[in-house]
Amino acid sequence: MSDATKPLRSTAWFGRTDKDGFIHRSWMRNQGLPGDVFDGRPVIGICNTWSELTPCNAHMRELAERVKRGVWEAGGLPLEFPVMSTGETNLRPTAMLFRNLVSMDVEESIRGNPVDGVVLMCGCDKTTPALVMGAASCDIPAIVVSGGPMLNGKFRGKDIGSGTDVWRFSEAVKAGTMSQEEFSEAESCMSRSAGHCMTMGTASTMAGMVEALGLTLPHNAAIPAVDSRRKVLAHMSGRRIVEMVREDLVLSKILKREAFENAIRVNGALGGSTNAVIHLLAIAGRIGVPMTLDDWDRVGRNTPTLVDIMPSGRFLMEDFYYAGGVPAVVRALAEHNLLHRDALTVTGISIAENCKDAANWNEQVIRPITRPLVEQGGIAVLRGNLAPGGAVLKPSAASPHLMQHKGRAVVFSTIEHYYERIADPTLDIDENSVMVLQNCGPMGYPGMAEVGNMGLPAKVLAKGITDMVRISDARMSGTAYGTVVLHVCPEAAAGGPLALVRDGDMIELDVAARRLHLDVSDEELERRRKQWQPLLPAQNGGYQQMYIQHVMQASEGADLDFLVGRRGTIVTRESH
Ligand code: FES
């Protein structure tokens, strides 16, 4: 029986002696479960995003078996269930379109079923925020087990990183410094084990974020997918979730403002993805912690980037694990008062206590705070007449010489327009131009595609130039790099000033001053606004139509407006 004073919600299904109790137990017994597993023990849902169409998560059924061992050992009943899985590499038009749909699947699967606590099996980018958002709306005991990163890519004697080196190689092919044969050979050398991207892309970032939020056991983020210690972590997480149910350690006891501020700081120290901004705002919205875009700048601004990982640095997640992983980073930040030390975690103790003995075994990979990779890491939140609702830029992935820049706009009205124009050798563009992409925000794309890091024109690349200022309402893969201003709010499709930019307009970027300015008079902008026509995607019904009608702006987490908040686990009707 449970030690919790609160009755377990699963007893409303399995603890009854009437017809409904018969139905709930009898059908479950067709799986070979003995009768005494319905004796009031905690029922643990294992929410799995396993899918062969999501290669980053394809190994997670085996990992779930390890979780089950732990649950059984601790006296719980593990029941695995699938939810929609979103893989970045296959799902079109963009996995982000479906993050909120997955979160609905998770929330309703938890609420509608006899589960007392959940283990969230996450991996590829959106699967982590989606599962946490759904569980947060239920406010149930939950622990995250990530699938873990792939081993380092190896190509011709060198380490290569997921995504980051794809961008690099494809630019090299365009510039004529890499052959098509070499490009094809690299393909099999990059993804050589189970797991998600092993750069500090969005998957690794979000695995780091849930560890920093206190939702995982220590080291969850960095243990490689195929390292036996990942199985141990899964096993131990299974044991721990049973105890968490008994302690009634629900998500809202962990996901306080302090936890989010810790995650923002850890993101800065990791050189994490800009996508974390949107996902953390959405999670905060679900659990009911008021967070804004400006919290990212205010809290994260003085955080040094310590971890030297691609795309900001040189190493990869495997190296990061061997160097000490997130616990070593947490300890360094805590010792320099850059963390809320007392923030509670799933272990039942504080984050600082969890990491007090964490060692840094390699100061090349995890730099000491006195010798950081980037002094001022974090995410810069920019404002100005071009982004009155804010925009973001990742300084650690940008070029120092472009952080203050004024240039002539070259405008692409859609991503298709970009592909069409950029291939034109007569396009009037050089390295000082500012590339502007419109209509790729949450409503406009829809789903907010990861296309903000538009490839440079071939004639600029041929000069050996590798970066230009790029501005859009789109997102960027966490594995990408460059002086890229993203998430411009309001987006063009919603009538934001971004929609009014024309070829030849001057744009000023000043990251230190957090300024993004379109050098066009208010009168002229007003004149253009009167002529402006929204360019919305076709609404053919279904989920996509609901999404366009209800999605909020990136500065609010791009959640659907009616999903914000905590709805708990009370079911509206109890019988069949
Ligand atoms: Fe899945 Fe990068 S594609 S984590």
Image (cartoon, helix red, strand yellow):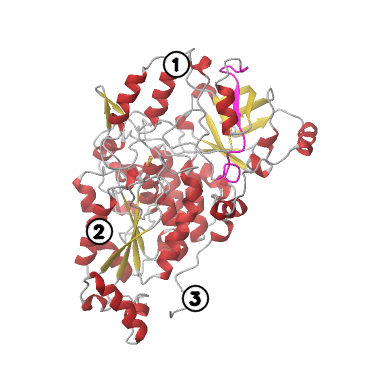
Q: Residues within 10 Å of mark 2 (few under 14, many from 20)?
A: many
> In front: mark 3 or mark 2?
3
Quadrant of the rendered image holding ligand 1: top left
- Quarter the C terminus occupies: bottom left
Residue 266: quadrant of the picture: top left
Residue 35: quadrant of the picture: bottom left
- The amino acid on which the numbered mark 1 sits, given as a three-letter code, is Ala
Extent of the magenta region: 427-446
Q: Would residue 369 appear left or right of 510 to someone viewing this image?
A: left
> In front: mark 2 or mark 1?
1
Q: CA distance from mark 3 to mark 2?
A: 31 Å
Q: Residue farthest to the front? A: 540
Residue 172 is situated, as x and y percent measured from the top left of the image, at: 41, 19
Disc 2: residue Cβ within 8 A of ligand 1's nearest atom: no
Mark 2 vs 1, N-terminal side: 2
Up-down relation of residue 350 to residue 447 (above or below): below
The residue at which mark 1 appears reads as: 175
Disc 1: residue Cβ within 8 A of ligand 1's nearest atom: no
Residue 191, visible in the rendered structure: yes
Residue drawn at point x = 58 percent, y = 55 percent: 546
Q: Would residue 411 appear left or right of 307 to someone viewing this image?
A: right
- The amino acid on which the numbered mark 3 sits, given as a three-letter code, is Thr
Residue 357 is situated, as x and y percent measured from the top left of the image, at: 25, 47
